[in-house]
Image: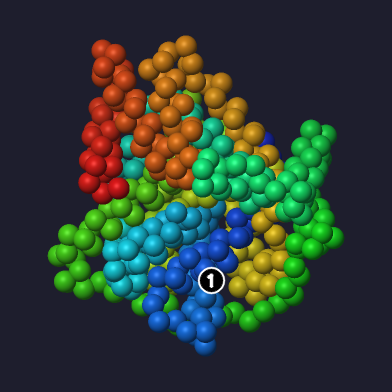
Amino acid sequence: MKSLNNFFGVEAHGTTVRTEILGGVATFLTMAYIFFVNPSIIISAIPGIGPEIYSQFFGAIMVATIIAAASATLIMSLWANYPFVLAPGMGLNAYFTYTVCLKMGIDWRVALGAVFVEGIIFGLITLLGVRAFIVSALPKSVKFATGAGIGLFLAFIGMKNGNIISSDENTFVTLGNIHSPEAIVTIIGLLIITSLFSLKVPGSILIGILLATGLGAFLGITKFHGIVGAIPDVSRTFMQLKISWSDLVTPTFWVVVMTFFFADFFDTAGTLTGLSTSAGLSDKDGNLPRSDRAFMADAVGTVIGAVFGTSAVTAYIESGAGIAQGARTGLASLVCSILMLLTLFFSPLASSIPASATAPALIFIGALMMVHLKNINWDDTTEALPAFITVVTMPLTFSIANGIALGILSYAAIKLVSGRFKEGHWMTYLLAILFALYFTYFH
């Protein structure tokens, strides 16, 4: 314990080894769904899969997802020393499958090649310090709004997973079936977590998830799938990426690469900015120390993921579960990465936790992250409106990257028309121009 304390600087960050371990477990439980959801999305990009080989591809993509996530999270832990986890991103996997492969007709192996190239580019610009510079140039109001926007996004996902809200053809979203077992588990789980947290019970979020899982078993939504299973064969997707000269000279290939680049860059930048502010790890300007190391974890994870057979890796907003539990160092992400690797052996057990059991944790964490709104100058409309746009567009467009992009666009436009052009960083205006071009020609 003493060596862990010294290596990660646990006491220096005002936490304990026990708190960090509980934080890592809490984060793992809220994000483990990706190991089973991601394969179900990526597999749709592969044509001609019959029932006899479906499970083989699904298992291979699951292993790829776990390896990519664990590799990136280990780098985040041991090199960057932050309690953030990374994994193939929701949204990025949907773009990979439904837009690149199914709509644009690009072979899934070529799409993996595009992800690989994007990861290499990420690594290069991180080494050059470009990523850290761009993030530091973001307006303070947008940075603080990003934390709150991510919180609202988390709560939205939690309510959706818990059947508190559902889609509607006329109103887009409406009240879900609150009498359903999923909604009951979510509501009771939220009450448990809130009560335990207010009483300062250690491990309150983790306890709430486990108790909600038990209640789900009583109501018939927690399905026990066993404990140990064999590690699936990864050969179906390992080293299947394709990068040929004909692809590299095709404009469409680079459109795909740059779209992955844009979404991944600002998903990770926004998530790290919001979570670091929430955890008190950022400086007075909202910047994250050692951000280059954190970004490199993303780049390496993306490259490894492409080699094994999955879409781009990004920082996960579910890291907020561990942060809310008190985690502040890389020990929490180390614990989470170990649990990820153990999932290779215990995937039946991990898949037994229903989404409605982790939903209350996401809603609760989202509420905690609203505190960032107090740092915004709401009396200055040139700061307030871009912040508001950033916050609301994240959940409404289901994208952190879109929220940041629209926030920066509105910030630049409002400062310009208000005659307060000099208050913005030159990089902010350059980004605004690039975002305008992106939404005009590529979105």
For residue 134, side relative to residue 26 (left or right): left
12 in relation to 213, above or below: above
Q: Where is residue 113 in the image (x, y as percent from the top left)?
A: 31, 68
State the residue in front, 389 or 121: 389
Report crowding for label 1: few under 14, some 14 to 19, many 20 or more residues within 10 A (C-alpha): many
Instruction: Please name the amino acid that badge 1 sits on.
Output: Met
Q: Position of residue 201 (x, y in %)?
A: 81, 40
Q: What element carries label 1?
A: helix
State the residue in front, 80 or 183: 183
For residue 13, side relative to residue 384 (left or right): right
How many marks the image carries: the answer is: 1
Q: Position of residue 431 (x, y in %)?
A: 28, 35
79 in relation to 62, above or below: above
Asked whether residue 170 is in view, the answer is: yes
Q: In which quarter of the image is residue 302?
A: bottom left
For residue 11, side relative to residue 268 (left or right): right
Extreme front residue here?
A: 170
Instruction: Give the residue drawn at x 54%, y 25%.
Output: 373
Give the image's coloring scheme: rainbow
Instruction: Give the residue drawn at x 60%, y 55%.
Output: 31
Instruction: Give the residue drawn at x 37%, y 49%.
Output: 263
- The residue at which mark 1 appears reads as 62
Asked whether residue 362 is in view, the answer is: no
Q: Quadrant of residue 243?
A: bottom left
Instruction: Give the residue drawn at x 73%, y 46%.
Output: 178
Q: Position of residue 379 (x, y in %)?
A: 47, 11
For residue 208, side relative to residue 131 (left or right): right
